[in-house]
Amino acid sequence: SKINVALIFGGKSGEHEVSLLSAASICKHINRDKYNVFTIGITKEGRWMFYDGNEENIKNGSWVDLANQNVEINLIPSGNKEVGLKFEDGRVEKIDVLFPVLHGPYGEDGTIQGLFEISQIPYVGCGVLASSVGMDKLICKKVFSQIGLPQVDYTYTNRWEFNTNKDQELNNIEEKLNYPIFVKPANLGSSVGISKATNREELLVGIEEALKYDSRIVLEKGINAREIEVAVIGNEEVKASIAGEIKPAKDFYDYEDKYINGASTYDIPANIKTEDMEDIRRMAIEAFKGIDGKGLSRVDFFIDKDSGEIFINEINTLPGFTNISMYPKMWEATGLEYPKLIDRLIGLALDSKK
Ligand code: ATP
Ligand code: MG
Ligand code: MG
Ligand code: MG
């Protein structure tokens, strides 16, 4: 009999739209002979709704108006209720595996994974700890440096400290880092809220913008970087794909470039030295294991164009998952096609002991 998969998409994060694209793509390519797919959307306000319809409407956002609000989504084992989806006619569909196709806060940060643990239903991807560490750029940097992975210089500020004395906080940052400085909300992705400051004025504006998304801000030394990414898969036995290189169309790889214009290009495999390729693949696995990763992650690196040094930038525990996203593309180039990749990730969820 078929396996019941619940795809959960949308969500309250700044990456809601990206999630719609990832989910639509999975819906389109998942093997329907093996899986029954139930799609559950989360609105930007955080309401969960069962949506039974085509992927076009997921992509364009109209699923919100078409959702069936009478289907009960029971994820908490309680009383004599069955965990699963309860339809209007009383039928309950058990969920065999949950697939969070969500990016950013509330989806990629361990919160929903905590709910899944409570539900006792297996789920795709990292657990609570890896998800929350991976999402938090500040904590993640501490873990990476503890396991000896090279990173660019950085510092941080937070809303309270910054608003208490902006001038002093800007002075502190300028003392630690030279321009250009990258300003990032600690918890987000898809380059939302990220900017590159080349002077104090831009630094001020950048921090104020980033503070709209998070109360903690990471500031990094901006380097002249080649951008290399690696896809990782596995629970105990972890494998890294061939690395790819992103070539942003603009100054840096921003939201528009990632999802709107798509003007950036890429090379898979990345055209880098064999030893750099090996180092990067090894470090990707170390990073994944270092945060207690399970299932999947995409690990992003920089190679400094001036010095040739390699730096780890970040780990994304639920990376973009459209069929043209880097994670699936790098697997495709490594010999694992998109539908098989989906199958593999669900398989890992079903046999993992989290
Ligand atoms: P993702 O969508 O990969 O989760 P994100 O929002 O977590 O993205 P980062 O990957 O940290 O953000 O940064 C976004 C982009 O900004 C990078 O791909 C790169 O182009 C640029 N960038 C970030 N940090 C630096 C840096 N220290 N030096 C140079 N460029 C940087
Ligand atoms: Mg990221
Ligand atoms: Mg991300
Ligand atoms: Mg990134």
Image (cartoon, grey):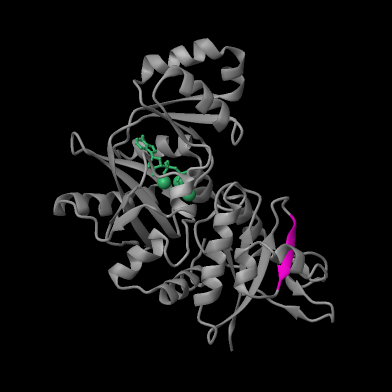
Q: Position of residue 235 (x, y in %)?
A: 42, 63
Residue 227 inside the magenta-drawn segment: no
Q: Which residues are magenta?
A: 47-51
On the image, which quarter does residue 2 sit in? bottom right
Please give the count of numbered marks on the rendered protein: 0
Measured as percent of width and height from the top left, residue 63 is found at: 70, 66
What residue sits 67% from the left and 59% below the top?
A: 118
**Is residue 198 found left or right of 168 in the rendered image?**
left
Residue 154 vertical placement versus 45 (above, below)? above
The picture quadrant where one finds residue 296 is: bottom left
Q: Hey, which quadrant is residue 237 in on the image?
A: bottom left
Look at 50% across and 40% down and name the residue there: 136
Given residues 51 and 336, the one toward you in this image is: 51
Please give left or right for residue 173 compared with residue 32 in the image.
Answer: left
One can see residue 317 in this view: no
Answer above or below: position of 135 versus 164: below
Q: Position of residue 169 (x, y in %)?
A: 50, 15
On screen, 100 above or below 203? Answer: below
Magenta-drawn stretch, dominant element (helix, strand or loop):
strand
Furthest residue toward left: 274
Q: Residue 279 in the image: x percent, y percent?
A: 22, 49
> What residue appears at the point 66 percent right and 50 percent down from the top-left corner?
12
Q: Quadrant of the N terminus?
A: bottom right
Say left or right for 250 vs 161. left
Residue at x 21% of width, y 53% of height: 277
Residue 193 shows in this picture: yes
Q: Nearer the viewer, residue 37 or 121?
A: 37
